[in-house]
Amino acid sequence: LGGKKVSLPVQVSEAAEGILEDFEGRPDWRQSVLPAGLAATAQVVGGTVRSGKQALRLQYDFASAGGTRALYATRTLDLGAAFALRAWVYGDGQGAWLRARVRDAGGEA
């Protein structure tokens, strides 16, 4: 690009796939909402799933408040030496968006 040349180191390794959370075990997800008191829940329920019988359902009524509104579902999971993360998401098509934040063992985002 414009005569510039850039080199980046790339590490290639064999992919080892595994499910980190299937929601079939203990449901220790924590939820928080912004603003406080917003009608929202994050709970493990039966229903539409990728595998197994349960999924994490995020339910909210963001029309009841203005400004920034959010529902957070959080849990600490050991990813090991992961280099990729996938999630299957079933939405309602109403334009809400999903974000994920991952922190390493040292607490760095």
Image (cartoon, rainbow, N blue to C red):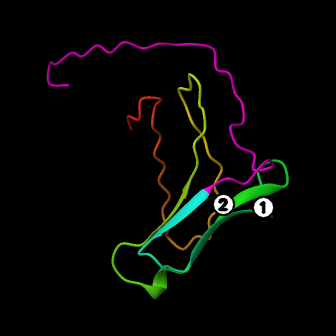
Residue 54: x percent and y percent? 80, 56
- The kind of residue tagged 1 is Thr
For the view shown, which residue lies furthest in the right direction? Answer: 53
Vertical placement of 67 versus 52: above or below? Answer: below
User: Which residue corresponds to the image point at 57% horizontal and 75% vertical from the top-left?
Assistant: 40
Residue 90 is tagged as: 2
The picture places residue 82, in percent across and down from the top left corner, at 56, 26
Q: Which residue is pictured at 49% across the width and 70% down the height?
A: 95
Image quadrant where one finds the N terminus? top left
Q: Is 98 a magenta residue? A: no
User: Viewed as shown, does residue 49 lie left or right of 60?
Assistant: right
| Residue 13 inside the magenta-drawn segment | yes
Task: Identify the element where label 2 is drawn.
Answer: loop
The answer to which image quadrant residue 66 occupies is: bottom left
Horizontal and vertical percent position of residue 37: 48, 80
Q: Are marks 2 and 1 in contact (CB under 8 Å)?
A: yes
Q: Give the quadrant of the C terminus.
A: top left
Which of the 4 image quadrants contains residue 79? top right
Label 2, label 1: how far apart the Cα atoms are: 8 Å
Give coordinates of residue 81: x percent, y percent: 56, 22
Number of numbered discs on residues? 2
Q: Disc number at residue 48?
A: 1
User: In the rendered view, does 96 fall on the left or right side of 79?
Assistant: left
Taken as a whole, is the magenta stretch helix, strand or loop? Answer: loop
The residue segment tinted magenta is: 1-29
Task: Please say if 86 is above or below 35.
Answer: above
- Around disc 1, counting alpha carbons within 10 Å, would you say few (fewer than 14), some (14 to 19), or many (20 or more)? some
Question: In which image quadrant can residue 35 be found?
Answer: bottom left
